[in-house]
Amino acid sequence: MRHRRRHTIGADLIKGAIAGAVATWVMGKVTDTMYERENRKARRQEDEARGGKSAYGVAAEKTARALGSPLRGKQGEQLGAGLHWALGIGAGAAYAVARRRFESVGRAAGFGFGTAFWALVDEGVVPALGLTPGPRAFPWQAHARGLAGHLTFGTVTDGTLRLLDAIA
């Protein structure tokens, strides 16, 4: 007689947070490597469009301003990095819960999740919130790197969850 494992939302959230952290780290390695190897003209165009700031750095500044607490020194970079990790961990947790409860979500082994995350967040929400200029301000290489990074994020999140499901 086989035992069916019971999957609670709490267990899925914890596994998803772990998977999201792993995927955020791997995605960072992939996108950093791609950025370093990009055409210099494309990198310069992207850097100019961003004004030398990342979307997370801008989010950190806006958050601090809204709270009436100016950032000093490296606080903006640190808060921005924290926001980036929190988003990755939270997205991993949400994916873990959704893939267990809606079969179609996990069917593509994270590719659909990564693609949707890139399209909705990077290409839509981030510019809508004024964290970056609109998509047309960036060269195609920036969009391709973002898509590759989020496909990596989605597949690593899914793979990590499958591994965690197999061992726990």
Image (spheres, rainbow, N blue to C red):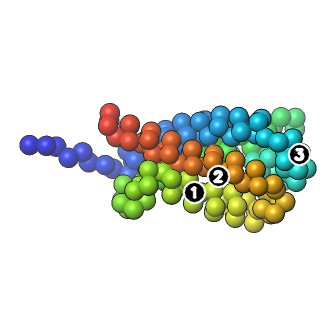
Q: Amino acid at mark 1?
A: Thr
Q: Of marks 1 and 2, which one's residue comes earlier in the chain?
A: 1
Rounded to the nearest whole Å, what is the CA distance between mark 3 and mark 2?
A: 20 Å
The image's mark for residue 88 is: none
- Which residue was labeled with disc 1? 115
Which residue: 70% across, 64% down?
A: 124
CB contact under 8 Å: marks 3 and 1: no
Look at 26% across and 48% down and name the residue there.
Answer: 6
Q: What residue does disc 3 label? A: 41
Residue at 34% x, 40% y is 165
Picture coordinates of residue 37, whole percent (x, y): 76, 36
Q: Residues within 10 Å of mark 3 (few under 14, many from 20)?
A: few
Q: Nearer the viewer, residue 11 or 53?
A: 53
Q: Earlier in the sequence, mark 3 or mark 1?
A: 3
User: Label 2 amino acid?
Assistant: Leu
Is 116 situated left or right of 130 in this image? left
Q: Earlier in the sequence, mark 3 or mark 2?
A: 3
Location of the C terminus by quadrant is top left
Which residue matches tag 2? 147
> Quick one: SS at disc 2?
helix
Give the Cα separation between the discs numbered 1 and 2: 7 Å
Quick check: can you spot residue 67? no
Q: Nearer the viewer, mark 3 or mark 1?
A: 3
Q: CA distance from mark 3 to mark 1?
A: 26 Å
- Give the image quarter of residue 21: top right
